[in-house]
Amino acid sequence: MTNNADMYDVAVVGGGPAGLAAAVSAHDAGAKRVVVLERDVRAGGILLQCIHNGFGLHHFGEELTGPEYALRFVKQAEERGIEVKTSTMVVSMDEGGKGGKDGGHIITAMSASEGLIEIAARAVVFSTGCRERTRGALMIAGTRPAGVLTAGAAQHFVNIDGYLPGRKIVILGSGDIGLIMARRLTLEGCEVKLVCEVMPRAAGLARNMTQCLENFNIPLLLSTTVIKIHGDSRVTGVTIAKVDEKLRPIAGTEEYIECDTLLLSVGLIPENEVCAASGVALDARTKGPLVNQCMETVVKGVFACGNAVHVHDLVDFVTEESLLAGKCAAEYALSLSASKGAANEKNKTVSVHVEAGEGVNAIVPQRLDIAAGGNIPQGEGKARIMFRALDIFRNVTIKASFGGAVIAQRRAAVVRPGEMQTLEVPLEALSKGMAGESSADGGGAANGGVQTGVTISIETRGDK
Amino acid sequence: MAQKVSKTFDIAIIGAGITGACIAREAARTACNAVLLDKENDVACGASKANSGIIHAGYDPVPGTLMARLNVRGSEMYGELSKKLNFELKNTGSLVLAFDDGGVQKVHALLERGKANGVKDLRIVEGEELHKMEPSLGGNVRCALYAPTACVVNPYQATWAFAESAVINGVTFMRNTAVHGIERTNANESLFVLHTGKGDIRARYVINAAGCAAAQISKMAGCARHFDIKERRGEYCLLDKKCKVTANHVLFQTPTALGKGVLITRTADGNLLVGPSADDQEVAGDTSTHSASIEDVLKAASLTIADIPKGDVINTFAGIRALAAEESEDGKGGKIIDDFIIEEDSAVPHFINVAGICSPGLSSAPAIAEYVLELLGKAGLDTSARSGFIEERQGIKSFALADTAGKKALIKEDKRYGHIICRCEEVTEAEVVQAVHSPLGARDVDGVKRRTRAGMGRCQGGFCLPLVTAIIAREAGIPFENVTKKGGSSFILEGRSR
């Protein structure tokens, strides 16, 4: 594949908040030709249906609604003359081995107006968001009537189409989308009878618990799940039951709840069908691509950000992560075009794995790429590690350890699984530890040598 | 308002499952005018949409039965029919796996039975050869009966294809038309009057292909043949197309201590299907799934393939087998009659029962239809072929199955092929529109789903449901909030928001 004038510097797959931020920062980092590919009729992603406010407290210092937050970035993209192709679905990348070499990538996309098109780009950013876990995947027993929806699908019907999914609602799952919909449907005049949550603690943000359930007197039943759906044409009711510590229904605790709608808010699954099919390796835990501190996947020049990498609680963090991804994608693209597509011999790196230690669930990034010889190739001198706690812990110290030494730490009064945590790790602490190492192979591969790595752990401090 | 039907038909076929659909198509070859009725809002709403989709080779039915004869004949017909009528069929072959001595004996018995039934190319495979054929099998498999002629089809697309071919050839299809009474006109004893919610339908000959309701229909007509339909529920797990399980053939199990055995197969569309259970029905018409049954299905399946990835399950569903049985007091059926009931009733001339069409019903359906036309001929109907019968039926050209050149051509033909509606299954707006407008079109979300696969992927309609609902509303000219999942009162939505 040759490096030619028709190529984009950066192509962004998905025009939600992640993709738009990546496109904007790619442009600001010097990428002249940037294109965003968005399957919906307008850019903005899932935020377009999130009409409640609470977005942007961190990033803008304001409380915006979802569409308002999205619009800020749509405008930023417009102001920079970034091309946004809407109603355009990406179907594959580097299909049949075309592209994917050091010269860039070829994306196949389609739209009613342009038909099947190929887009060549030096760097690609996947910001494809996620989908919701379904009734089918949960294997909830019972009939299959109308009135069983994921909370996000219901949100689309209510906020975009202007229709109600039903009148008497039961919500399974205390994830944020379920909590938000509990409030929205109550405000629309429906009766939200209860929210049940299979875990012993609520899944969503604390403020949503207050603002969506407590303020509306909607009961939350913990350690409770839906075990059966009733009704032939439409839902007529559900059977709920308490669960034990292994999350199995406890016989004798069944209760029938009359309702005409069951909403499911039981987990988000990053959508990575396209990039995975083209060779991007995924993390079995997060279901998102394995990335380094620059949000680059295992495939050179392919980056990922936003919910596609790991499910976020706050769009502000999505934006931060995506600004970084876009910047790194641009830097990659510019270095590629400067070197006229030839493999960059200088970019031999060593990968340091980042591992989940005590108390920690899935981590992003999963590896830190350090240039052999100690120079840091891209990004800042610090890596932002993001992760979730396995449980609620109070009075903790969050630590990053490498080679037996603690290289970063911070204290926290409380950490919850429902609230993503971050820890900044100085990369020079790693390069120092590896002085003299060099990569084993050439060809520009990022993982010449994999060190056993940085471990992130959460330790309870005790009574201090 | 129900429209009163005043026309008199030569043939009325009650039930638009695979059986009724095949009969309707055969009837369309004659000069007779025929009507195909179903109580639901579409064809294939009963067992025809909730089965394993297997065209059995024919070694299982007892030799000499109708089941045996029609299974073998039907299975021979499917290959050509799938091409003419454009429905998915894959000639995977099947393996009946033996895990113990009893299984080995059974497998050999099936081989003999198959030979007696005239099934071609059956043989026993084992050891190295079996392992090459199916690398995922464990060391617990002693041997297997290999039937190269077995196939998998998409059974609801096949049903739709047969029924649509019938409609293209002049058969009238009436949906939402349940029969609640059958009489003969006093004026002309040989004319039936079917009382339905849409008015009275008069017909000279009536075919009872009503599935689980066949015994009720037969009783309505006053048939001499007394039987009941015993319902046996089968529950299934459907897994993501991407799941990393190799199953090159349909994999059956011989009965073991765990039970009758379940099958594992890739469907004609590429999903992995595991099941079915065989549960006695407590409540007639119950198509709900039960946690215990699903757990048992997965456990039983693990005998064949050890690590079926539960995380890849995208749906569970159930279908009801309609078994012909001796009459019983509670109407649920007594002793099982191990065969189809296909006959003109001795007390009701021109009334043909086609009842108890359980497995191998799907496999036999085209042959059942041939046989029913023979019976109609014997009963006095002129069944000679007319000219002008159209053999082929186009269906919907699938975007997902086309290659790149094919995709470009489709988009050129209709721009709406460029607009993806269902991302998981790569279904486009053009196909959804065609599903509504085709000669036997969809009128609800599930009908669109069965015709196009929109909503059948891993997100189960999470992304496409609002889009499909909007297209149905637009194309069928009905208000958005009146769109249903499967007809009747199965409204997707409640009404407008404030």
Image (cartoon, rainbow, N blue to C red):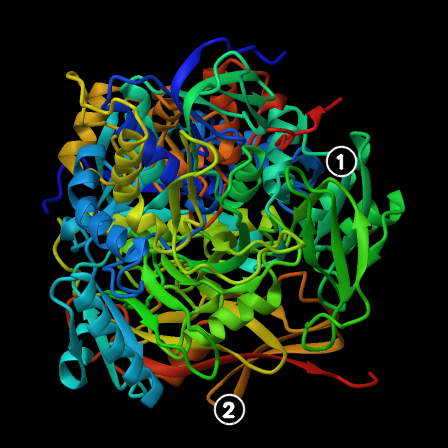
Q: Position of residue B62 (x, y in %)?
A: 31, 65
Q: Residue at x 19, y 71 (%)?
A: B146
Q: Position of residue A347 (x, y in %)?
A: 23, 65
Q: Is residue A259 left or right of residue A400?
A: right
Q: Is residue B159 visible?
A: yes
Q: Is residue B417 visible?
A: no
Disc 2 marks a residue whose amino acid type is: Gly
In the depicted structure, whether residue A397 falls above or below residue B10: below
Figure quadrant of residue B100: bottom left
Q: Position of residue A46 (x, y in %)?
A: 55, 38
| Marking on residue A120 | none
Towards the viewer: B66 or A114? B66
How far is the residue under mark 1 from the one under mark 2?
52 Å
Towards the viewer: A245 or B182? B182
In the depicted structure, whether residue A413 falls above or below residue B328: below
Q: Residue at x 50, y 59 (%)?
A: B234
Q: Residues within 10 Å of mark 1 (few under 14, many from 20)?
A: many
Q: Is the Cβ of the residue at disc 1 closer than 8 Å to that at disc 2?
A: no
In the depicted structure, whether residue B404 falls above or below residue B241: above
Disc 1 marks a residue whose amino acid type is: Leu
Towards the viewer: A55 or A170? A170
**What chain is tagged by disc 1?**
A
The residue wearing badge 1 is: A185
**What chain is tagged by disc 2?**
A
Q: Secondary structure at mark 2?
A: loop
Q: Position of residue B122 (x, y in %)?
A: 15, 69
The residue wearing badge 2 is: A404
Q: Is residue B53 left or right of residue B316?
A: left
